[in-house]
Amino acid sequence: MCGRYALHSNPEVVALQFGLAELPEFRPSYNICPGGDILAVTRKGASRHRWGFGNRIANARGESVAERPSFRDAFRAGRCLVPASGFYEWQTIAGQKHPWYLRPRDAALFGLAGITSLWQGVRSVSLITTTPNAVMEPIHDRMPVIITPQDYAAWLDPDEHDAERLMRFVRPYPAERMEGWPVSTRVNQPANDEPALLQRVAPRQSRLL
């Protein structure tokens, strides 16, 4: 799954990477949570969307996103990219959950795969998840789908509706191009939102990556 993420890139860099002529105002955030308004990029440009279909479903499983009634129409015609600098996941050790911050090694900014739909008049986003790569596997059994820049246009292509072809993007990010480290449990509180959340802390019975 993907329960939190960060976006702290310069707006000009975001606009350049995602090919945007205009960008809604946003401030850097180190603890973006479901239920809030987030930046999403569609074929029409960038705008603010509510994170969570029906204000509840923050993630859509990639294995069933093309068939599940809640998601299939959005997968075919409502795909989006959610700009991110990194994301958090929680590792369970001895019954306690410990947060990790993860990101591609080779990308300070990247796109999370998402789908959009109208829920009671609110434009909403759900992030697509997939099976973990070798970096994620010791931490959690799911990870968000990351779309590489060279695939942005194909993912957002409004003329592409074939689920089988679209599923080629729903895959784990290459483990050799990914890194992560344990961070403070302060990220558990949505009110905490500062760069210090990304600082490495001592691992709990796990190796550093």
Image (spheres, rainbow, N blue to C red):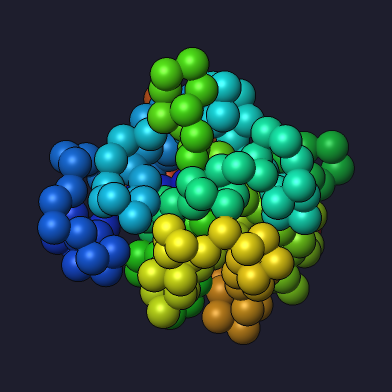
Residue in the foreground of this view, choosing between 28 and 187: 28
**Residue 196, x across and y down, in percent:** 37, 47
Res 135 → quadrant? bottom right
**Residue 16, x across and y down, in percent:** 19, 67
Residue at 49% of width from left, 46% of height from top? 78
Residue in the foreground of this view, choosing between 60 and 93: 60
**Residue 113, x across and y down, in percent:** 52, 56
Looking at the image, the residue that sits furthest to the top is: 120
Res 43 → quadrant? bottom left
Vertical order, 53 against 9 (above or below)? above
- On screen, residue 198 versus residue 145, left or right, reads left
Vertical order, 35 against 129 (above or below)? above
Residue at 56% of width from left, 71% of height from top? 179
Looking at the rendering, in which quadrant would you find the C terminus?
bottom right
- On screen, residue 16 versus residue 6, left or right, reads left
Residue in the foreground of this view, choosing between 114 and 179: 114
